[in-house]
């Protein structure tokens, strides 16, 4: 057993700050929360937190670990005056250049950096058209090596090889979900990685692909993870080719439910917003990516029932994402305040609960999974439930992250992993150069 002594316990939804708390962890769960627990549990390993902030783990609810080696890319990129040209000239060339080696190091480095930034879980959305089979299993290795919890899926699409590519993508999603089922049954205590059924975006998935995805969702019991209405083009394409709004089209194939994860959704219609709320699905807001791709601002945040925060491949720093989400919203004249975005940050754990059946996330209470972020933050003003969101928006950062616990195990302590990571970064740099050369040839 592990006992965290003298914590400042922090929760996000509803906000709560309590000083002088002890937290006992037994196995992968929180066993007891209270004061002066050391005397009650003399055999527990005690770590004195010295008043550090101890909070439920942060979740990046939408990411692309395949883009981990794109930082500072030196491959020649043609001008990108709009979103579709950005996809064609940059991201769709990058994902075609991925092979087994580059994907392994991309996923591993992203997993390590997510932990360093205070994430206990990341929900990934993957694409590597030249390396589809077993790509998700390879990504899982990176999660496990870092000790990070997460989910992943393959972006089903027809953009490179038509129906053959659609079928291969769906097959990879199904096979990975079945692999997870077997591993979960064999060792439920080590269950760290789950599956979604992935698709790129409605404009690259024809009806035959939606039929395949429907069958995959039904047969595996998983939910759909897909980009929708990230750019106006996705909506125009759906209206022109299918005579429907994009979410209405997905709903036609029974793909919208309480496990559905819709990324972006900037250009959804009022009807599609109402439909997503009715189906109890999640929208994941990715403020920095939207700004980087110049696709616009999502005005629907106050109207949506379930919103979580993601990064869409721009790292896994949820402190940074929180700030950008809030500041961009204020810049756009929105009505929400830091406390509203605090709830969105907490909703990443609600997404995990919907997919890791039987596990509870997001609170420092008995019976909840011990996924915990510990921060060393000296507040220069009073810190309380009423202003917790303001402290994150205007004070805290990933530099505050001191330690990270996942499934009851301290995987990152005093800003260090228990193993040397430098060799991984050295190999990743070599793999990135090779991948960039390959991109230049595509």
Image (spheres, grey):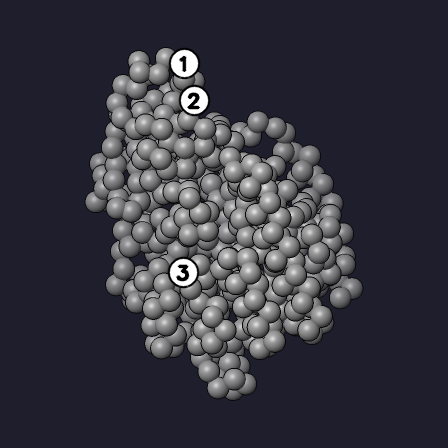
Question: How far apart are the alpha carbons under marks 3 and 1?
Answer: 42 Å
Where is the C terminus found, in terms of image quarters? bottom right
Instruction: Point out residue 422 in the picture as x, y percentages from the top left corner.
Output: 65, 34
Classify 10 Å Cα crowding around label 2: few (below 14), some (14-19), many (20 and above).
some
Q: Secondary structure at mark 2?
A: loop
Residue denoted by label 1? 43
Classify 10 Å Cα crowding around label 3: few (below 14), some (14-19), many (20 and above).
some
Q: Secondary structure at mark 1?
A: loop
Which sits earlier in the primary sequence, circle 3 or circle 2?
Answer: 2
Q: What residue do we see at 61% from left, 37% from top?
A: 145
Question: How far apart are the alpha carbons under marks 1 and 2?
Answer: 8 Å
Q: What residue do we see at 53% from left, 29% from top?
A: 416
- Whether residue 209 is visible to the viewer of this picture, yes or no, is yes
- Whether residue 377 is visible to the viewer of this picture, yes or no, is no
The circle on residue 1 is 2
The quadrant where residue 168 appears: bottom right
Find out whether the residues at labels 1 and 2 contact each other: C-beta distance under 8 Å: yes
Which sits earlier in the primary sequence, circle 1 or circle 2?
Answer: 2
Question: How far apart are the alpha carbons under marks 3 and 2?
Answer: 35 Å
Above-or-below relation of 381 to 110: above
Q: Using the image as rendered, state which of residue 311 and residue 222 is in the foreground.
A: 222
Q: What residue do we see at 63% from left, 63% from top?
A: 170
Above-or-below relation of 30 to 260: above
Where is the N terminus found, in terms of image quarters? top left
Instruction: Point out residue 161 in the picture as x, y percentages from the top left corner.
Output: 72, 72
Classify 10 Å Cα crowding around label 1: few (below 14), some (14-19), many (20 and above).
few
| 355 sits left or right of 437 in the view | left
Residue denoted by label 3? 258
The circle on residue 183 is none
């Amino acid at each position: 057993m592990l006992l965290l002594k003298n914590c400042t316990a922090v929760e996000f939804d509803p906000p709560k700050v309590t000083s002088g708390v002890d937290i006992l962890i037994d196995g992968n769960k929180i066993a007891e929360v209270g004061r002066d627990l050391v005397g009650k549990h003399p055999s527990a390993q005690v770590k004195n937190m010295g008043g550090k902030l101890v909070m439920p783990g942060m979740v990046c609810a939408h990411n692309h670990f395949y883009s981990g080696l794109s930082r500072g890319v030196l491959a020649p990129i043609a001008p990108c005056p709009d979103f579709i040209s950005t996809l064609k000239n940059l991201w769709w060339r990058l994902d075609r250049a991925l092979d087994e080696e580059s994907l392994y190091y991309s996923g591993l480095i992203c997993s390590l950096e997510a932990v360093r930034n205070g994430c206990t879980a990341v929900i990934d959305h993957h694409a590597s058209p030249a390396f589809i089979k077993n790509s998700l299993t390879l990504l899982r290795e990176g999660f496990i090596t870092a000790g990070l919890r997460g989910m992943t899926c393959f972006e089903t699409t027809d953009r490179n090889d038509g129906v053959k590519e659609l079928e291969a993508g769906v097959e990879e999603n199904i096979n990975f979900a079945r692999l997870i089922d077997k591993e979960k049954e064999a060792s439920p205590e080590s269950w760290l990685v789950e599956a979604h059924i992935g698709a790129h975006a409605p404009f690259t998935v024809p009806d035959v692909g939606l039929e395949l995805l429907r069958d995959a969702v039904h047969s595996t019991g998983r939910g759909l993870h897909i980009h929708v209405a990230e750019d106006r083009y996705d909506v125009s394409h759906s209206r022109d080719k299918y005579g429907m709004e994009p979410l209405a089209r997905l709903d036609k194939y029974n793909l919208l439910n309480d496990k559905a994860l819709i990324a972006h959704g900037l250009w959804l219609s009022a009807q599609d917003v109402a439909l997503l709320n009715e189906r109890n699905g999640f929208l994941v807001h990715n403020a920095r990516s939207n700004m980087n791709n110049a696709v616009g601002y999502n005005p629907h945040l106050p109207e949506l029932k379930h919103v979580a925060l993601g990064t869409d491949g721009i790292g896994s720093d949820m402190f940074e994402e929180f700030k950008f989400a809030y500041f961009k919203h204020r810049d756009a004249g929105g009505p929400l305040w830091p406390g509203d975005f605090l709830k969105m940050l907490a909703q990443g754990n609600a997404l995990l609960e919907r997919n890791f059946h039987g596990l509870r996330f997001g609170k420092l209470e008995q019976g909840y999974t011990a996924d915990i972020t510990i921060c060393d933050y000296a507040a220069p003003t009073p810190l309380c439930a009423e202003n917790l969101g303001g402290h994150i928006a205007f004070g805290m950062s990933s530099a505050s992250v001191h330690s990270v616990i996942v499934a009851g195990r301290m995987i990152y302590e005093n800003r260090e992993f228990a193993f040397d990571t430098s060799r991984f970064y050295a190999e990743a740099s070599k793999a990135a150069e090779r991948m960039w050369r390959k991109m230049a040839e595509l």
